Amino acid sequence: MRNAKIQRTTQETQIELTLELDGTGQANINTEVGFFDHMLHHVAVHGLFDLTILAQGDLHIDSHHTIEDVAICLGQAIHEALGDRKGIVRMGSALVPMDEALAQVVIDLSGRPYTVVHADFDSPVIGQMPTSLVAHVLESIATHARMNLHAQVFYGRDDHHKAEALFKALGRALRGAVELDPRRQGIIPSTKGTLTK
């Protein structure tokens, strides 16, 4: 079973997260930041991951710590659930439209974290989620999952649609990358023989 359970407790947040990579897209998510919940739900549904998240944070300050720490936990869960990464496809990409918006996410579960995000938003916030945190979420997930992630919004008028296209693309790209390749049974897809160092 490729799954993980992450618990994180700080003076700013308390988070419990479970992830099943080989799931059916069942999601039970409550970060108390509605728009962020909506985006994470898309990752689960389009990635076919079973994902549960219960988070409480210092929202009386703002939503930054909660959003950042949940992204860290999700990245850690992906890393843990992948184990030694034997047999995985490793790379994945998705190009996703959302009405007038178009976004793409390309990832490599290489063990080497790196993130490039090109996404411009017109509004400072969507619901309770600052748009400045969209790129930070992607970076935090990629860093802690130890993956290379490139994301881009090509165009769009509505900030909600642009963000939604990005998170749907993240789910679909991850789904492709974590899939087990029947032609690589028990083999690490790397010429150096490891994807965890």
Image: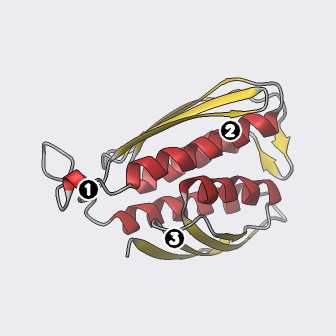
Q: Quick one: quadrant of the N terminus? A: bottom left
Q: Amino acid at mark 1?
A: Pro
Q: Residue furthest top?
A: 155
Separation of marks 1 and 3 at Cα, in angstroms: 23 Å
Mark closer to the chain start, 1 or 3: 3
Query: In which quarter of the view is residue 159 placed?
Result: top right
Residue at numbered disc 3: 19
Residue 138: x and y in percent read 56, 45
Residue at numbered disc 1: 182
Q: Residue at x 49, y 71 (%)?
A: 20
Q: Amino acid at mark 3?
A: Leu
Disc number for residue 165: 2
Q: From the viewer's side, name the closer residue of 149 and 42.
A: 42
Q: Secondary structure at mark 3?
A: strand
Q: Secondary structure at mark 2?
A: helix
Mark 1 crowdedness (10 Å alpha carbons): few <14, some 14-19, many ≥20? few
> Is 44 left or right of 164, judged from the image as shown?
left
